[in-house]
Image (tube, rainbow, N blue to C red):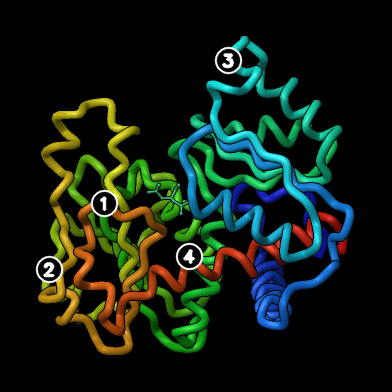
Amino acid sequence: MELKHVLSADQFTRKDLDHIMSRSADMEDILNKGGSKLCNGSILGALFYEPSTRTRLSFETAMLRLGGNVVSETDVTFSSQTKGEVLEDTIRMVGGYADVIAIRTKTKGQAGIAAEYSPVPILNGGDGAGEHPTQSLLDLYTIIKHHKIGSEPLQVSFVGDLKYGRTVHSLSKVLRHYEGIELSFVAPEVIQMPEEYRKSGDKISYELTDEILQTADVIYDTRMQQERFEDQKMFRKVRDAFIFTPENVGLMKPAATLMHPLPRVNEIKQSVDTLSQAKYFEQAQNGVPVRMALIAEVLGK
Ligand code: NCD
């Protein structure tokens, strides 16, 4: 497969997804053997203009485990953008220093703009309330590890802030490539899944019912994105809409998985972490092999 940039989940065909999943599994083997020198001499530029722990660190870890190096900018207040430099100029410059750029921006669509000006591949690490395509690939990798995706029916319920949460936008697109997946969107009306990500046949629910908990194979919970709400009163109204506790997670099938891109705030109690359904820390860990695969692919290695 030829992969130039990773900007949106729209760009992947089913064949691409199969290839990236198998390359990620190979990278996991390489990681377990201590890493490789595949990207020896290559540099990753990490430009993160919104808070990040997992995405930036797993991108950086991925490059280091491939034998490459990293330069990063993590706070816009220390960036020349504070002096008025436009993103296009920053990208042209960093593209002259690094061989690949992972970028997180505050505004939807900015990763695409970066790609227009970049001499090197751009990996979208989240563009505002838009998309988070590399996260959707590690989410898919995690689901494949625990479920027979594509060959039997799979009920996937997205729960939480589906309007501003970018991870569910990308993951819904990726999952539509597989037969037998039924998507349900569980959120208060004001933060329901935007129309552009919906398809006929999707189920919409405003409450997290016992039936959803009992029938879901995958529950993908998300954080209420306080920073993206225009109306903070509205945020306070919905912030505690759904809380996962050992009691309600106990209603889930033993083989079901509870996922979350993290960070969680109060939507999953820490007492849930030890239950067999809780897979969110493993999910975060999968970011390293999947991002190793993406870096190797865009660098043509
Ligand atoms: C998410 C993000 O930044 O979109 N985190 C992540 O990348 N793992 C989710 C969030 O911030 O709630």
Q: Nearer the viewer, mark 4 or mark 2?
A: 4
Q: Amino acid at mark 4?
A: Ala
Q: Secondary structure at mark 3?
A: helix
Q: Position of residue 173 (x, y in %)?
A: 51, 58
x then y, percent, for residue 242: 16, 57
Q: Which mark is residue 284?
A: 4
Q: Which residue is mark 2?
A: 209
In the depicted structure, whether residue 86 falls above or below residue 215: above
Residue type beneath disc 2: Thr
- Marks 2/3: CA–CA distance: 47 Å
Instruction: Judge by depth and name the residue closer to the eye, 37 or 95.
Output: 37
* Among numbered discs 1 and 4, the one appearing first in the sequence: 1
Pointer 1: what residue? 265
Question: Residue 85 appears at what percent x and percent y?
Answer: 67, 14
Vertical arrangement, residue 242 with respect to residue 219, above or below:
above
In what element is the residue under mark 1? loop
Mark 4 residue element: helix
**Tag 4 or tag 3, which sits nearer the N-term?**
3
**Amino acid marked by disc 1:** Val
Q: CA distance from mark 1 to mark 4?
A: 16 Å
Q: Are marks 4 and 2 in contact (CB under 8 Å)?
A: no
Q: Nearer the viewer, residue 5 or 275?
A: 275
Q: Residues within 10 Å of mark 4 (few under 14, many from 20)?
A: many
The disc at residue 82 is 3
The residue at label 4 has a CB less than 8 Å from ligand 1:
yes
- Residue under the image location 39 percent in, 84 percent down: 153
Q: Eyeballing the image, is 146 above or below 4?
A: below
The residue shown at (57%, 53%) is: 57
Q: Earlier in the sequence, mark 1 or mark 3?
A: 3
Query: Cα distance, mark 1 to mark 3?
Result: 30 Å
Element assignment for label 2:
loop
